[in-house]
Image: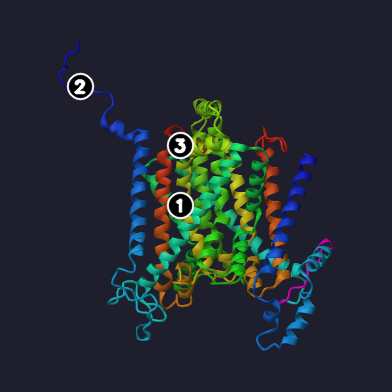
Amino acid sequence: MLRYLGLRIGQGLLTVFLTVSTVFLLVRLAPGDPAAAYAGPTATTEDLERVRAQFGLDQPLLAQYGVFLRNLVQGDLGTSYSFQAPALDVVLGRLPYTTTLATSAILLTTVVAVPLGVWMARRADTMRELAGNMVTIAGQSMPDFWSGIMLLTLFAVAVPILPASGFATWGGLVLPTVTIAILQVALISRLVRREMVAALGTPYLSVARSRGFGEGTLIWRYAMANSAIPVLTALGTRFAAMLNGVVVVEVVFSWPGVGSLVVRALETRDYPLIQATVLVTAALAIGVQLLVDLAYPLLDPRVRLGKVASS
Amino acid sequence: MSAVLPSVERPSAVTPALRAAAPAVRRARTLRIKTWIGLVCTAVVVLPVVMASLLPLPGPDTQDLSARRLPPLTDGHLFGTDQLGRDLLSRVLHGGQVSLLVGLLAVLTSGLIGLALGALAGYLGGWVDGVASRLAEAQMALPLLMMLLLVVALFGSSVPVITAVIPLAQWPEVFRLTRSLVLVERGKPYIDAARVLGLHRITILYRHVLPNVVRPVSLVVLLLLAQAVLLESALSYLGAGPERPFATWGRIVSDGQDYVTTSWWIATLPGLVIVLLVVGVNLLGDGLRDRSRRPRTSGGKA
């Protein structure tokens, strides 16, 4: 168990390191000069030189990488060009907004998608299921920026009952959450449906039914026990992906989270900020995946961590 | 000796009503409905897009400042006009050509990469499998949209770049499916037979294994097309989409967002077109995939 944990954490650290290094290289290969973005259009050549020297951008690439690694070990991710503050602090300051949004979205998804999936599984291949299926496919097919704009227009402009953007009140959380959940509900409910149909067809469920358990017990206690692992895995993956920044939705709703920070950092070529964002979000995503894996033995006593066949 | 039996209506225990209620028949019916609706939705979008330059429409970039933001169904403008007086339908159809082209080329690339790597990894195993599988796993941990934005910022937002960038997001899906299918095929007797005949490993893979896995894989690629169209539109919404020769759907929506309170159609209608196309492709892919699966296993895991 401890060995497994150590191995996984080691793998995770390696992935984060490789990701950040790739990003380090990519941003520096990209055209576009952070010095020009920082100094503004009126800057003279001398100004640009001065700014480059100030940011250490006049050094050779390898030297820059060396400095970056040395600072990284000390927990220093550099100073954001545009915020003039430690990049890590800027990212961590935005992080709560993204985690709040991701958490509420995943909660809403679970609450809606699991019962919906069960409902569809119990009516498999009927016209009513087809109707439900159509709704989920429609949800899956909407571009999130578009459904966001539509919700915003309907509930913040046409019928102004909810705030349009930002995070001034808790009401501001509703529209972005729903926008994200529309897509996720479609994906998760179809997975739940598939798993439940498979579970409902198993012999052990027939045995349980013949012993006279009620339909509710059958589904939620027996069938769900076997469907839980794939569903939890999918929810964990979706959650981890959301922590990477729900970029589009954050932009639509001017949500002050990591996603909109990334877009701004890319626009201003703010290298330290881009690197810090990637580092933090990748680490979080990998952490969430690890937690999901650690939860398997709790759901299924047959699972022994570290001894799972790798196929 | 065969006597000719008189054909009589004999009562059967299987009445038409019972047969119509049988699970297999019900399944087939829902699949048929899905496939047909999917086909119709896809055709409704794809046909006009393909024929965009033949249709009697104003040019997508023809501005007419006296006819700005005309609502839909005003004369000559089925979808209305945008903030610069350009015909919205024409813009959507011409932009759709770019979106569709990018989507098709992107899934073709993802499909080929995924198929090749998946077949090699599944058939050869060993370090090839190890490397390819780790790559696919690492990809899952990456902040995907962010990486895509980064690459687009690096190489510019031309059609070839967007086409090359989308497979970064999609190849692992094809890879995993191909690999698992090839693993199953590899254990079958005909492979042993081919090996006994002295065929080279690659020949067996190419001539005998691949034809057996290509069909299910191609159906997943069809579903990926829906995803690719969505991804492209998200990129162009964020300002990282192709701008030449025509602005694509995501860009038109993003332009229309500023006018959504006064002119709802500029952002709404292009979005609806995306939804219609993606719903169509999804339904079509779903229907065809489920139909090609054997009924007994269709309820279970893929």
Q: Find numbered disc 2 in the image and state the secondary structure of the residue it sits on.
A: loop
Q: Nearer the viewer, mark 3 or mark 1?
A: 3
Is the C-beta separation of discs 3 and 2 under 8 Å?
A: no
Where does the magenta region start and end? A72-82
Q: Is residue A221 visible?
A: no
Residue B235 percent across, percent down from the top left = 53, 66
Residue found 76% across the figure and 79% down from its top: A52
Graded by Cα atoms within 10 Å as few (under 14), some (14 to 19) or many (20 or more), the crowding at tag 1 reads many
- State the residue position of label 1: A136
Under mark 1, the amino acid is: Thr
Q: Nearer the viewer, residue B93 or B68?
A: B93
- State the residue position of label 3: B298
Above or below, B85 relative to A153: below
Residue found 49% across the figure and 54% down from its top: B107
Q: Main secondary structure of the magenta part?
A: loop
Residue A243 percent across, percent down from the top left = 65, 59
Of the 4 image quadrants, the one containing the C terminus of chain A is top right
Of the 4 image quadrants, the one containing the N terminus of chain A is top right
Above or below, A260 relative to A242: below
Q: Chain of mark 1?
A: A
Q: Is residue A297 visible?
A: yes
Under mark 3, the amino acid is: Ser
Q: CA distance from mark 3 to mark 1?
A: 19 Å
Under mark 2, the amino acid is: Arg
**Is A55 displayed left or right of A229 in the figure?**
right
Residue A70 percent across, percent down from the top left = 84, 64
Q: CA distance from mark 1 to mark 2?
A: 45 Å
Residue A268 percent across, percent down from the top left = 66, 75
Graded by Cα atoms within 10 Å as few (under 14), some (14 to 19) or many (20 or more), the crowding at tag 2 reads few
Q: Is B157 contained in the magenta span? A: no
